[in-house]
Image (cartoon, rainbow, N blue to C red):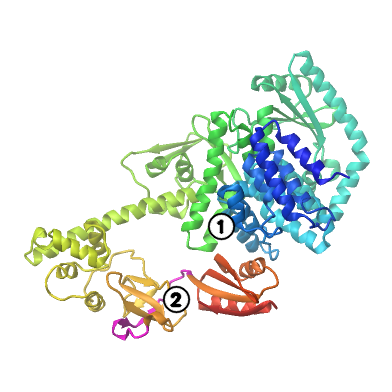
Amino acid sequence: MKTNLDYFNELLEKLKNNFSRDEIDEIKKAYDFAYQKHQGKKRLTNEDYIMHPLNVALILSDLNVDKTTIMAALLHEVINNGDTLEEELQEKFGNEIASIVKTVSTINKLELPDDKESSAIYLRKVLVGLAEDVRVLFIKLADRLHNMRTIWAVNPEKQKRKANETVNVLIPIAHRLGIYSIKSELEDLCLRYLKPEVYDDILKQLDDSIEGLEEVLEEMQDSLSEILIEHDIKFQIKSRVKSVYSIYKKLSKGKKWSDIYDILALRLILEKESDCYLAIGLIHSKFHPLPKRFKDYIAMPKENMYQSLHTGVFGIDGHIFEIQIRTHEMDEIAEKGIASHWSYKEKGTQKIQSMMEQKLQIFRNIIETYKETPNDLEFANQVNADILGELIYVFTPKGDVVELPVGSTPIDFAYRIHSRVGDTTIGAIVNDEIVPLSYELHDNDVIKINTNKNSNPSKEWLDFVKTSGAKTKIKAYFSKQDRAEYIESGKNILERELRKQHLTFNEVFNEVKLAKILNDLKMNDIDEIYLAIGSFRYTASYIIKLTTEEKHTITDALIEKVTNKNRIVPKNNNKNDIVVGEHNDILVTLGKCCKPVKGDNIIGYITKGEGITIHRVDCPNINNKEERLIEVTWSENNENEYFTDIFIETLNDKNYVSDIINKASVKNVNVISLATNTKEDYTIYNLTLKVKNVTELNDFMNSLYSFAFVKNVGKK
């Protein structure tokens, strides 16, 4: 039986050609640290615990990842299972590795609580939201692959739960990253534990015919080798019977075993791209190709960097063979996907670097959306579409490939090309035909975008665009435009009011008076004053009064606004959550001290320069301030979500983070942050949540008492 040292030496052997001696020494340092932290601990397989991070590092070494990823893989369990603090990792290995390990540790505490699709979407969202460094996902996938290889050691219920989680959450991510080698093995392993009878039946039928199939594969391999040798083409050849999962997919679509002909596959790996085209011609001249099975992904690569020639032929004894032809570099990219970037970090071509950047940009767009989207369900659906959903591959008129989610439109395509192209789009031609901008694109469409430098986006586009990138850029344009319009409107309103009062601008807004107003209202420049007037935050007459000797407070302005029934309300005004008097367009801010949630009993506090701050009536910060309080109520129509803080006091016998997170997931409550404060006899978990109303909050808080370890729950 191989020892820890055997596995580590195997890892070093794999790494020695890709890393310098100094880098190898750093990797040894990480291994030694992890070995000490896990010493004396065992896995359920009865192996030393260090065997798990070692195997994770070995899996990743096959992807040719960088030194940081290997070190983080060796260290990825030292926080959760090695009693190590993030600060210790920072001190010994730097902030980058410590951050990756910390994020993997957080993700590894999360579990899929049930089989509901909503739970799977939520967990995918959390993973993508946390993994700002995509290497976190590499480690998580390798971690799950090794755990699935050894999952025989846990009980059947947990086997099924982990397999289900892998199918619904992690395999789609592996697919999106293009890491076929991990995706394919995970698919087979999950089928084995989720549908053991089906898996065993397919395996038995394969075993019954495997000897004959292997003989046929060997004969076909020899025949192809003769063709290539005869024409002096250097090559490697690999042959295989298709995976159990790929056969299961065909069977699940209604095919009978006797109808599955193309379970024999060969891959030719050649030196040059030109050799690939020569080889396909030679093979087709000897073996009759199947109609419509030839695909040229070399001339028209997928945007996930995949390149290969695909064909199906009638080969030895009438068997159908699937044949792939590619170069060594193409094979590396096909197997390792986005992770292959690090193999070529020194010698990489511009094409690989460009494709890699596009792939990472999709993740950056999603993470940016995660920060900006207030609606949790909307964000979850966007993640599902942009990262985990079905994809189409379309082309520019020059033949460049663009990868988009199913349902994308010419507007999505235009913004994927460039923001300026999207902003100035006026029409689209698809496959030489004019189509509406809401047209749904399909695989292999060729799209030409017509632009006009004087044109601007339309808000109607938001009703049909699919990708988060397009939505974000359209919203950003109108946010900027609205600001400019409000400033211009405010300037005009102020000038009219000055003329009405027979005043000049220089008289009212000299240097001293302007500085005083800006200071009183906590603004930076005159444009912010125009913006406040144009958006009806303040009236022009109130701003002018502030420059006079007459005493005029912010309270007066608010009273003036509430009682002014003849004022003009802007169209399409976004209403606030709070009603003041009969008005719900007065500037209000929710108090950060007590963070009220819709349904709480609330009161308004009139501040200087910032409108009205809303507090819970029991907030200690509004005691003894009756003269500046004003009655307010919640708007009945708003459907916003609110940030609020709670604490959970638990027993101090173990870490309960994953239990709390899972409970929040079941209750559809979004945990924004979680901090732990451990005392001698108890632990306090401080959570910031995002909820719709106080009913949802109370339901979640009450549900926590179902845990025996929870002693107390309360609002902060």
Residue 480 can be seen in this image: yes
632 part of magenta stretch: yes
Q: How many marks?
A: 2
Residue marked by disc 2: 594
Q: Position of residue 166 (x, y in %)?
A: 71, 54
- Pair 1/2: label in front: 2
Left or right: 690 in relation to 457 = right
Q: Position of residue 105 (x, y in %)?
A: 65, 57
Q: Position of residue 135 (x, y in %)?
A: 61, 46
Up-down relation of residue 676 to residue 47 (above or below): below
What quarter of the picture does the N terminus occupy?
top right
Left or right: 168 in relation to 675 = right
Q: To which quarter of the image does residue 610 belong?
A: bottom left
Q: To which quarter of the image does residue 310 belong?
A: top right
Q: Position of residue 370 (x, y in %)?
A: 51, 56
Residue marked by disc 1: 381
Query: In terms of secondary structure, where does tag 1 sit?
Result: helix
Residue 249 can be seen in this image: no
Up-down relation of residue 334 to residue 3 (above or below): above
Left or right: 199 in relation to 609 = right
Picture residue at 47% right of the left edge, 79% below the top? 599
415 part of magenta stretch: no
Depth order, front residue of 422/96 = 96
Q: Residues within 10 Å of mark 1 (few under 14, many from 20)?
A: some
Query: In terms of secondary structure, where does tag 2 sit?
Result: loop
The span picked out in magenta is 623-642
Depth order, front residue of 12/163 = 12
Identify which amino acid the numbered label 1 is placed on.
Asn
Up-down relation of residue 289 to residue 436 (above or below): above
Identify which amino acid the numbered label 2 is placed on.
Cys
Mark 1 and mark 2 lie on one chain; the one further toward the N terminus is: 1
